[in-house]
Structures are given as C-alpha cells and as structure tokens.
C-alpha cells in the first residue's frame, strides 16, 4: 500500500514538473535559425552629401497610410534596413525625416519580391542644365523688360 | 528653411497659400502705387530671382548639419515690395526643378522667407537717418543687420512650424532636438549672409546708388 502511495506521489510530481511553463522548464534551450531574405536598404543623406544620422524612419505598408508598419532610425552612415512583408504586395512607402527635412521613397513589392523603387535624386549634370535654363530665363525676362518702348 | 511636401498638415499648407496670396496682392498693389511705370522694376527683380534660385545650391557645413544660402535679406533690401513676388517665383522654380521645398508648401515657404525679407527692407530703410558722411558705413551696417534678421526670423518661423506639427507616429522629442540643432546652425549662416549683403550694398552704393532707392 505504501509503495503504491509513493508511486502515485512520484507520478504526480513528475506531472507537475512537466506541466510547468515551457520557458522555465526549457529555459536553457535556444534555437537559432538563419534564412536569407531580400532586404531593402534606404540611404538618407542631405543634398551636400552628409548622412542624415539619427533621422527617424517610418515604413508604411500598402493601404495603410495612417499607421506605420515599422518605425526606426537611420544609423550613423544614414542607412536603414528592413524586410517588407512579401505577403502584402503593393506600394510600400518609407518616410525619412529629421528637423523638418525629409522625403518619401516608394517601393513596389510583389509576391516574387521587390520590383521597382521610385523617388531618387538628379545627377549633377541635370541640375546644372536646369539651373542654366532658369538663369537664362531670368536674364531674358530682364532684357525683355529693359528694352525701350517703341 | 524650405519646408518640403508632406511635413505640415493640409490645413497649415492651405493657410500658407492664403497668407502668401494676401501678401502677394498687397505687394503688387504697393508696387503699382509707388511706381509710375511698375514694369521698370522687373529687370532687377528678375535678375535677383535668378540669384535667389541659385543661392540655395550653395551649402555651408555647420557640424553636425549643413545649411544653404537663402538670401532673403538681400532680396528684401534691394527689391523692397518686389521681393515677395520674386521669392514666390524663385521658390516655385526650386520646388519644381530640384524638389527643394514643395509645391504644396509653396505658400508656407513664401511666408517663411518672404515676410522676413519685407521686414529686412524696413530695417534697411533706416539708413536714410545716417548723415552723408556716415552713409557708407551706415548702409553696410544696416545691410548686415537686415540680412541677419531675415535669416533669424525665417529659421525661427520654420522651426516653430515644424515643432508644432510633428505627426503622432514620430518621436517629438527627437525631432525637437534635431530642429533646435538646425536652428542654431543658422546663426553662422546669418553672419555669412549679413556680410555678403553688406558687401553687395556697399558695391551698389558706389556704382549704382539708384538701385538701392526702392521705397516702401
């Protein structure tokens, strides 16, 4: 009779130990797995070239312009990495902002992966050409209004 | 100092357009009343618009950030009431060509940069109080002060606007710290623009004093 009672006690205790929360019971086991993913790198720099270190980033998932899907900040080199959820295809928007400066880039994501990135800067040549056009327009305007009435 | 698209709420952008429209109307009316041939001022305004447009491409490093020339003070000092429409056109071109500033914030930016320019002109007109002997020194000094005031007021107005309209999804404290840093970076810019404006007005006083006679 005593041995039966002792056995019951042991079984009950074993159950109790096993029924404890998993984190406690299996606290030493850590499983790390690695899977390659196509991540997006956002580079944020001011026009003069220096990185927007510490600028705040908000990532908006398609169809959800009000609440950011992810928040973060760019690193010292002005970079920010994230992996968009490929189950949510559409236009993802990444907004970078620091001290009222900032911009938005749009990334087209399809189930197969990233397709297209829109929103980029101009080359120095394009800039110079546009500046020259404006300059010439202004000089032309000045000359036009300067001419004497006939 | 140029507020880009998507930073301020729609109501602020609309208010900016309303205010800029009002000041433009006022400027044009004042120009019409003050000049018998208003178009005579257009060549000067046109050339300074080009200078204003190009100025924003010139950057100065002020660690940890960098600032660019605005020249709102110079515009106001030399152009008087012509300054506001000229700045409006310059900002429009900057927004369209270089995405510097934005079309939705054109009104807001015109107010931030244009109204201090008009105030700078008011400051500069105080030079008539200097006697003929101290005319040059007084003109240079007031050119400096007018340009510094224009930069300081513009930077302060832009900072205030940005800080008070931080969207909920951003960390307001981080943004405020960054804005404060940028605000102080405009102090050296004010000095640079002040010196530049002083040199320009001294030069104009020597070679073509008539160009500085724009009146309110």
Image (spheres, coloured by chain):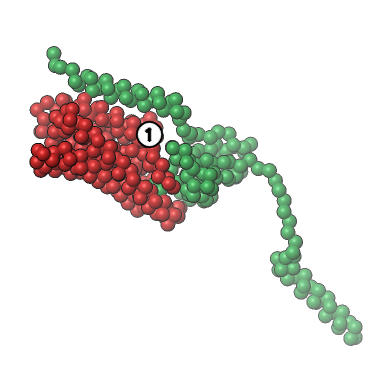
Chain colours: A green, B red
Vertical arrangement, residue B95 with respect to residue B162, above or below: above
Chain to which the residue tagged by mark 1 belongs: B
For residue B215, what is the image quadrant? top left
Q: Mark 1 highlights which residue? A: B57
Instruction: Identify the residue at horizontal 74%, vertical 64% (top origin).
Output: A28
Residue B63 image point, x, y percent:
43, 46
Farthest residue to the front: give it.
B133
Marker count (numbered): 1
What secondary structure is marked by label 1? loop
Instruction: Identify the residue at horizontal 23%, vertical 20% (top origin).
Output: A143
Q: Quadrant of the N terminus of chain A?
A: bottom right
Q: Quadrant of the C terminus of chain A?
A: top left
Residue B119 image point, x, y percent:
20, 43
Instruction: Identify the residue at horizontal 68%, vertical 43% (top origin).
Output: A36
Q: Residues within 10 Å of mark 1 (few under 14, many from 20)?
A: some
Query: Closest to the observer: B178 or B109?
Result: B178
């Amino acid at each position: 009779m005593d041995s039966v009672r002792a056995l019951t006690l042991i079984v009950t205790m074993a159950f109790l130990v096993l029924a404890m929360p998993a984190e406690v019971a299996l606290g030493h086991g850590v499983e790390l797995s690695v899977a390659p993913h196509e991540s997006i790198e956002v580079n944020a720099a001011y026009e003069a070239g220096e990185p927007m270190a510490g600028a705040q980033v908000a990532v908006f998932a398609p169809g959800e312009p009000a609440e950011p899907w992810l928040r973060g900040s760019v690193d010292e080199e002005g970079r920010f990495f994230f992996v968009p959820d490929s189950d949510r295809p559409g236009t993802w928007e990444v907004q970078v902002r620091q001290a009222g400066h900032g911009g938005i880039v749009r990334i087209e994501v399809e189930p197969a992966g990233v397709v297209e990135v829109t929103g980029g800067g101009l080359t120095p040549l394009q800039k110079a050409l546009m500046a020259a056009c404006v300059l010439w327009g202004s000089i032309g305007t000045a000359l036009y209004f300067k001419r004497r009435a006939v | 100092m140029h507020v880009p698209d998507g930073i301020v709420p729609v109501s602020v952008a609309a208010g900016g357009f309303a205010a800029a429209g009002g000041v433009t109307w006022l400027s044009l009316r004042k120009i019409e009343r003050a000049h018998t041939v208003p178009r005579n001022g257009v060549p000067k305004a046109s050339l300074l618009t080009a200078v204003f447009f190009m100025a924003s491409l010139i950057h100065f490093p002020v660690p940890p950030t960098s600032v660019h020339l605005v020249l709102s003070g110079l515009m106001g000092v030399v152009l008087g009431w012509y300054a506001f429409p000229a700045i409006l056109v310059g900002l429009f071109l900057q927004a369209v060509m270089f995405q510097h500033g934005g079309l939705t914030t054109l009104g807001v930016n015109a107010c931030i940069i244009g109204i201090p320019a008009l105030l700078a002109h008011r400051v500069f007109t105080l030079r008539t109080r200097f006697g003929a002997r101290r005319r040059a020194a007084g003109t240079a000094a007031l050119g400096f002060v007018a340009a510094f005031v224009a930069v300081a007021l513009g930077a302060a107005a832009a900072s205030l606007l940005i800080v008070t309209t931080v969207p909920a999804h951003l960390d307001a404290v981080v943004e405020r710290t960054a804005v404060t840093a940028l605000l102080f970076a405009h102090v050296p810019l004010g000095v640079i623009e002040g010196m530049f404006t002083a040199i320009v007005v001294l030069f104009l006083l020597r070679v073509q004093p008539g160009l500085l006679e724009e009146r309110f």
